[in-house]
Structures are given as C-alpha cells and as structure tokens.
Amino acid sequence: MTVTEAEIIEGCKAGKRELQKALYTRFSGKMFAVCLRYSKNREEAEDLLQDGFIKVFHSIEKFMGSGSFEGWIRRIMVNTALELIRKKKLDFSSFDIEHVESYSDHITDMTTTIAENELLAMIQDLPAGYKTIFNLYAIEGYQHNEIAEMLGISEGTSKSQLARARHILQEKLKKTELNYRPQAK
C-alpha cells in the first residue's frame, strides 16, 4: 500500500512514527544530496541530514500546504547547512569585482562531455565559500541579495564569490575536456 504525501504530512503532525519513517524514506536521498553540496565530507552531510530532519519533524505543524512539501523540506536542509557555515565563520573574501567580471557568466557546454558525478565532484572541491555561494545561486536559485542576507555578507561579495567559483570550474572543465579529446595517432 502506497501512502500519499498528504497522509504522511498528517501522520507526522500526529506524531506517528511509521509515517515519520515514510517521510524520511521518501525524501532522505534527495535531501542527502542537498546536504552533500554544502558539506566538506560525507560524515558532515549525514549530520546535517539528521539535524535537518529533526527540524522538519519539530516544525511540520508550520507546513500549511501552500507550495511544494519537498521544497519546504529542502529549504530546511539548506538553512540547516547555512547555520553550520555561519557557526564555522567561513571567510567570504571579497575579490575585486572588476577583475572577476571578465570571467564568463556561464559554464560552457563542456559539461555535456563529462559525467554528472564528475561535475559534482568539481563543485565539492571548491573552497567552502565559493561552493556555498555557487550552490545557493546556481543550484538552489537564490538571488545575490538573498544570499547576502542569509550569510551576512555584501551582494558584491556574493557576486565575486560566484564569479570566482565559475572561473575555477571553467578551468577544471577545460582540463577535463582535454582528457576527453581523442589522442592523435
């Protein structure tokens, strides 16, 4: 028997353990991927996932059904990750925006020649500040003013961090593309 999302939500609001487990089972994979994007390693991502789901279960009464339930859970996971980042007091060094504006605003079509897991690994290898801004902007869809407010930084810092992250990714993609080119015989 398949349980609907509405039944899971109502069951979780009523504190039913089997429906809390159903919620975790249904969303933990996707949310773990979110947590991994903001973490330095798998263990930290697992801790974020656990902390995030605790918050989901504690605040599920606040979900009123407007908007996507998955999106609501994702926001909790992202906010949980950002809390950890703020606690660590990451250095969001600002770069001179005039120097980074010359970098392309788009990662080139080279991404089609590499596997998704390779691209995710490249993002994961970015310095923590760059990775955070890149994830919030490029993957989560936040705007620079929202990112600045969430992280307590200026919009210019957010923009320069994103530009620098993109530049680093482009350089990595160029190196990867060279590895994928057939060798002349």
Image (tube, grey):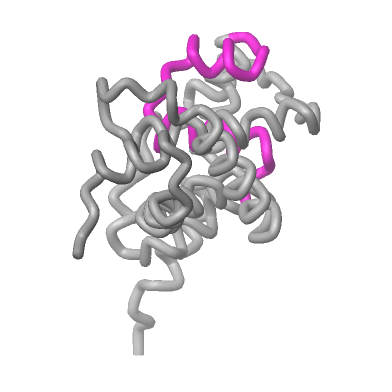
As rendered, which of 3 and 27 lies closer to the eye?
3
- Image: 50 above or below 148: below
Question: The C terminus is located in which quarter?
Answer: bottom left
Query: Looking at the image, how many numbered discs can be counted on the residues?
Result: 0
Give the quadrant of residue 71: top left
Residue bounds of the magenta highlight: 125-154
Tell me the residue at 69%/59% (across/down).
Answer: 43
Tell me the residue at 56%/52% (across/down).
Answer: 36
Asked if residue 148 is among those painted magenta in the image, a careful observer would answer yes
The kind of secondary structure the magenta stretch mainly shows is helix
- Image: 54 above or below 20: above
Tell me the residue at 51%/38% (across/down).
Answer: 57
Query: As drawn, is 40 to the left or to the right of 36?
Result: right
Question: The N terminus is located in which quarter?
Answer: bottom left
- Image: 75 above or below 101: below
The answer, for residue 121, to whether it is visible in the render is yes
Q: Position of residue 170 (x, y in %)?
A: 47, 46
Query: As drawn, is 74 to the left or to the right of 152?
Result: left
Asked if residue 113 is among those painted magenta in the image, a careful observer would answer no
- Image: 41 above or below 103: below
The answer, for residue 164, to whether it is visible in the render is no
Q: Position of residue 73 (x, y in %)?
A: 42, 36
Tell me the residue at 51%/27% (across/down).
Answer: 59
